[in-house]
Image (cartoon, helix red, strand yellow):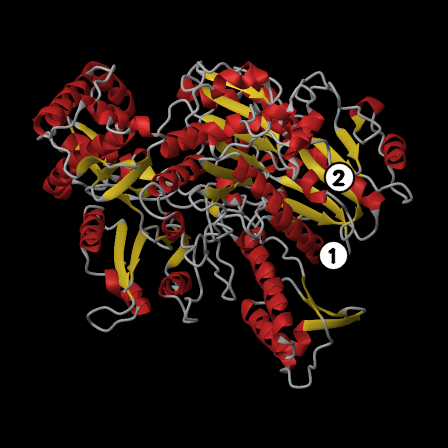
Amino acid sequence: MFELKTYQKNTLSALVQFLQSCRSVPIADAFHAMLATQNRGNERYQPVFEDVPCVCLRIPTGGGKTVLAAHAVALAGKAVLDSDAPIALWLTPSDTIRSQTLEALSNARHPYRQALAHYFGDRVQVCDLESLQTISPHDVGKACIVVVATIQSFNVTDTAKRNVYSFFEELAPHFDNLPANQSADLEKVTEADLQNQPYLTAADIGRVKYSLANWLHLRQPVVIVDEAHNNRTDRFFQTLGRLNPSCVVELTATPVAGNNVLYHVSAQELKTEQMIKLPIVLAEHPEGWRECLRDAVLTRDGLELTAQKETDYIRPIVLVQAAPKGNEATVDVVRQHLIEQENIPEEQIAVATGSQKELDGVNLFDPSCQIRYVITVEALKEGWDCSFAYVLASLQSVKSAKDVEQLLGRVLRMPYAKQRQQDALNKAYAHIVAENFAEAAATLKDRMVQNMGFERLETGALIIPQQPLPLTGGHGGTPSMPAIPDCHIEVPQVPDTQHWPEEIKAAVQIRETSQGATILLKGDVDSDTLAQAEAFISKTLPEKARVAVKEQFDAHRAVRQALRAPAQLGLTFARIPQLCLQLDGYLEIVEKETLSSIGDWDLLDQPVQLAGFTIRESINSFEIDVNGQQVKYRHIDAQQLKLNDVTSHISEQDLVRWLDMEVRKPFVSQLQLQAYLVKMLAHLIHDRGFTLTALVRARFQLAQAISKEIERLRELAMEKGFQARLFEMSVPPVEDSVHYSFEFQAGMYPARQCYQGSYEFEKHFYPVIHDLREKTGAGKVAEEFQCAQAIDAHPKVKQWVRNIERQEKFSFWLPTSSDYFYPDFVAELVDGRVLAVEYKGEPYKTNDDSREKKQVGGQWEKSSGGRCLFLFAVAEDEAGRTVFQQLDEKLANP
C-alpha cells in the first residue's frame, strides 16, 4: 500500500479526533477544540445540519487528497457509526472525474483501492448508481460499499425528474420489514411519479418509494465530497439532507466561505514530503512570446542534460500555453515556430486542445516516447497528470491568461514522489509574458491562493526570480549572494513626497500610471531603508490602500528572505547531538521505543481495571460513559430496547480476537495482549456485572477505553524509568556524533502559518519561518517574536531555525518521560557550538512540563562537554533580565 506521508497522517488524525469528539460534545465545541491546537481559535463553525458533522480538509494541488478520501471512508465509518462495513457516497464534480474515480477504486492495484483494502481486505464493493441495484441486502453490514456519483445526479428540486429518486421494484428486498418510525422520513410516491413511471398506479401514492436515494437514507452514508468548493448552494445542502448522512467530509484545495476547514496542509509540508517541486523559478519576458518560448526551450534543454545524471528516467517536458484564436501566438503559429525557429523535431510536439487530442493513449512516462513539448490553450483535461512536466511557458499576457494556475499545478508534481539528486530537478520553472518580476509573481501568487490552495503567507517564498548566473562561484564553491529583484509597489495615487527625507527620495523612483503610480525601489536596498519607504508611502494613502501596500512590501521581503536563506544558497547547518543512553552495551538515542524498554514493565503484572467505563440503557437510548465523556446511541426502533439482556451469539473468545486486532500495540506481544484481554473481559463481566451482549454492542468504545488504559500504564512505567535514568543520558563523543545527531536539511522544513511581517530576519536557515507572529491579538509585540529577534541579531549566532513541534523526522527534539519536546529555536553559533532555546510565557514558566524540560535541556547541555547550550528563556527572569540579556549571558562564555 502507498505509505501515507506525515501531513496525510496528521490530517486523518485530526479528522478522527474531531469525529470522535462529536459523539460526546457539541459539534461546534469539537471543531473549535481542534482549531485551538492549530492556533486558529478565531474561526467559527458554520452549522450545515443540526446533528451531522460537516468539515473540510484543505489539501493544496499535488497533495494527494483522493488517497486521503479513500482512507477517510473507513476512519469516518468507525468514528461516527462504529461500523467496520460502512456505506460511503463519494460525490464528484463532473462525470469525467466520476469515471476516473470509479475505475481507480475498482482496480485492486491502484493506491485508492489499496487504501480501502488496508481496512476491509476484500470486503469492498464499488459501484455507481446504475449498478447499485445489484447490491444484495446480505452485502449490507458485511462489506464496505462505496457508491461513486456526480453531485448533479442528486442535485434537483423536483425529485420526480431524476432516476436516483425513481421507484425500482428490484430494490424491494432492502425495504422489507421496515419499522414505521424509519419509513416516516423516507420519500413517498407522489402523483408526479405516476407521470414519469407509467407502471405505478394511483394505489401506489403514499407508499415508500423503493429508490436509490431512500436506500442511501436508510444506511446513513459517510459522504465524501470531492472539490467541495464547487457546491456551496442551498440546493446542494437540501439534497444532502435527503440522504441522511452520518457525516460529510469535504476535500478541496480552495475552500470558500462556509467550508468548515478542520485542517489545512501547507505547501512547505508537500515540499518536505517530496510531493511537489518548489520553489517556482520565474522568468518574466517583457519582450514578447517569442523570447518567452525561446528561454523555455533553453531551460528544458538544460534540465534534460541534468536529468541524465539521475538514476531514475526523467524526460523534462514544457507545457506551452498558446493564445486563443484571434491573437498572434496561436497553437498553429507556436507549433510552426518551434519546428522552424527552434529546430524542434515534429515528433517531440503534441497538441492538447478541445479539437486536437494528440496526448490520448500516449504514455508520457515511457522512455521510448519522444514528446517534450505539449501545446494547449486553456486547462488540460481533468485528471491529466505527468510529473515530467517541468517548465510552463505562458505566451498569453499574465494579466489575462486563463487557467494558468491549472497548468502551473501540472509542473509542480515531483517525479516518482521522491526528491531528486540534482537540485535543479527539485524546482519548477515558469516563463511568463509580463513587464516585470513583481507583476508576474503577484499574478501567479494570487492564482495560487485562489485556485491552488496555497496560503498567501507562504507564497512569497514559493516564487523566486531566475538567476542570470549560477549561485556558486568558481573559487572553492563559495555561494555568492543572488540578485534580488526590484521592488514594485502599485499605489492608487501619486504620493506627496514633499516631507520625505532626502535619502528616501533618492532610493525610490515614482512612475505615474493610469491607475495611480508605481513606486520602484532597487532590490539591493537595505532593510531599514525599505521599512522607512513603506512607512512614508503608507502615510499618504487611505486605510484600504495601506493594507494592499503592506501586502506588496511583505511579499518583497519574503522573496528577499527566500533568496538569501542559507539553505537556498546550498549551505549546511551543524549537526545537533542527541541525548543517548547505554543499553545492553550499545549506545542508543533515547527515543519513544527506548523509553518503553527502560521502564521495567510487563502488562500482565498491572492491575486489571477500566475505571470510568459504564454502559447505561434508557427508554430511548443507550449510553456509554468513558471517563466522563458520554457517547449516546439512539435506538432505531422499539425492538432494540433491553438488548443488553439478550444472550449474544458472539463468544468471549470472539470478542477477545476482535479486540486483539483493534488494540494491538507495537510494544506489547500478541500473547501478552491476548492474556490481558481475557483477564479484562473476566473483570468486566464477573466483577463489574456487564453482560457480554452489552460489551459486544459497545465494542468500539470498549477498544478505545482499553487502548487508553494500556497507554496510561505504559506511560507510568516510562515516567518511572525515565526519571531513574535521566542523569545517565548523555551527548555522544565527537567521533560518534554523526551517527547520533540530527541535521536540518535544505527543503525539509514542513512549515505552516508562515511568518510574513515588517521585520526582516537575516539569519534564518530556511526561506520561510514556521508559525511566528509579530503581534498578539491585542496588537502588542509577541514575546516569542522578540526572542527570535534577539537570536537573529546576536553577533555570535551564525544561523538559526524556528523548530517545528511534532515533526520528529524534520525537527530537533529531546526526550521527556512521556514523549518528545521540541525547543522553540535551534541556533548554530559562529564558533561551531549549537544552542537550543525553549521560550515560555509567564503563566507556564514554572509548571511541571516546564520543570521537566529544564531538567532534560540541562542534562543535554551538561553532558555535551561544552558543545551544546540550552536556554530556558522567559520575558523577564528573577534577576529582571530581558530575553536579550538572558541570551547574551548564555553566550558570554566561549
Q: Which residue is mark 2?
A: 296
Question: Residues under labels 2 and 1: Cα distance?
Answer: 17 Å
The number of numbered badges drawn on the structure is 2
Q: Amino acid at mark 1?
A: Asn
Q: Residue furthest bottom?
A: 499
- Secondary structure at numbered mark 1: loop
Q: Which residue is mark 1?
A: 436
Q: Quadrant of residue 181?
A: top left
Across and down, in percent, residue 731 comes to: 23, 42
- Mark sitting on residue 797: none
Across and down, in percent, residue 421 comes to: 54, 31
- Secondary structure at numbered mark 2: helix
Q: Is residue 90 visible?
A: yes
Across and down, in percent, residue 476 comes to: 53, 44
- Frontmost residue, 410 versus 316: 410
| Above/below status of 708 relative to 124 | below
Across and down, in percent, residue 620 comes to: 30, 37
